[in-house]
Image (tube, helix red, strand yellow):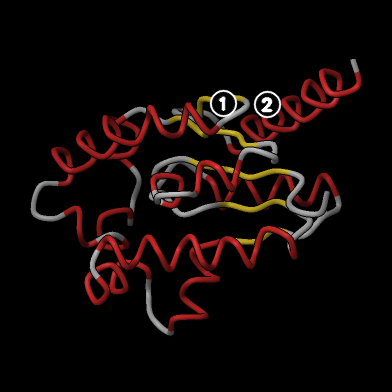
Amino acid sequence: MRGPVLILVGPPGSGKSTVGRLVAERLGVPFRDFDADLQREQGMETGELVVQLGRERFQEVERETLVRVLPEHTGVLALGGGTPTAPGVPELLEPFHVVFLDVELEHLLRREGLVPLHPWLLPNPRAHLRKLLAERRPVYTAVADAVVPTSGRAPEEVAEDVLATLTTSNEHQAG
């Protein structure tokens, strides 16, 4: 079956893009940032898209875009933070190896640039992130084949753990 060798999920700021690039480099495959796909296709940042289209239509666009991207991308794919919560997306992810990059609230709050990048977190980033993590963590866990903690860890260390999940996954499929 064609498609990504690995899909990363997790909240904004969990390290999906940074770790995804490292893993892709180690595997010798291309890296793709799903939010960049949406931005390129729709002509605006994902945060603006949510405001322009509304949450429901935005999630439809995410799903439609993912349907196109999955069969054509054979490397590492980092999904947007909310993408796995879109109706129909968990089913699309089932055939693929998905890793949830789990991060603690306090670590997210220390991430420089997270709030300006995601203006919907204002005026109270702590409250918004706490709610977001509480709502999305069960979805991330449900779609993932493995969970890798990222809080307070170097991206290279996280990438090693993500790569190890591929080895474990391949062993299970072979056995």
Which residue of the protein is positioned furthest toward the bottom in this rendering? 43
Q: Residue at point 78% right, 51% down?
A: 25
Which residue is at the far right? 174
Q: Is residue 153 left or right of residue 137?
A: right
* Secondary structure state at the residue bearing disc 2: helix
Residue 30 horizontal/vertical position (percent): 77, 60
Task: Tell me the residue at 77%/45% (across/down).
Answer: 5
Splitting the image into 4 quarters, where does residue 73 fall? bottom right
Vertical relation: 110 (above or below) 37: above
Q: Residues within 10 Å of mark 1 (few under 14, many from 20)?
A: some
Q: Which mark is residue 148?
A: 1
Q: Position of residue 38 (x, y in %)?
A: 48, 71
At 69% from the left edge and 36% from the top edge, which residue is drawn?
97
**Amino acid found under the numbered disc labelled 1:** Val
Residue 37's quadrant in the figure?
A: bottom right
* Total numbered labels placed on residues in the image: 2
Residue at image x 84%, y 46%? Answer: 27
**Image height of 85 relative to 48, above or below:** above
Q: Which residue is mark 2?
A: 161
Query: Where residue 114 sits: x, y (%)?
Result: 32, 53
Q: Secondary structure at mark 1?
A: strand
Q: Is residue 132 left or right of residue 18?
A: left
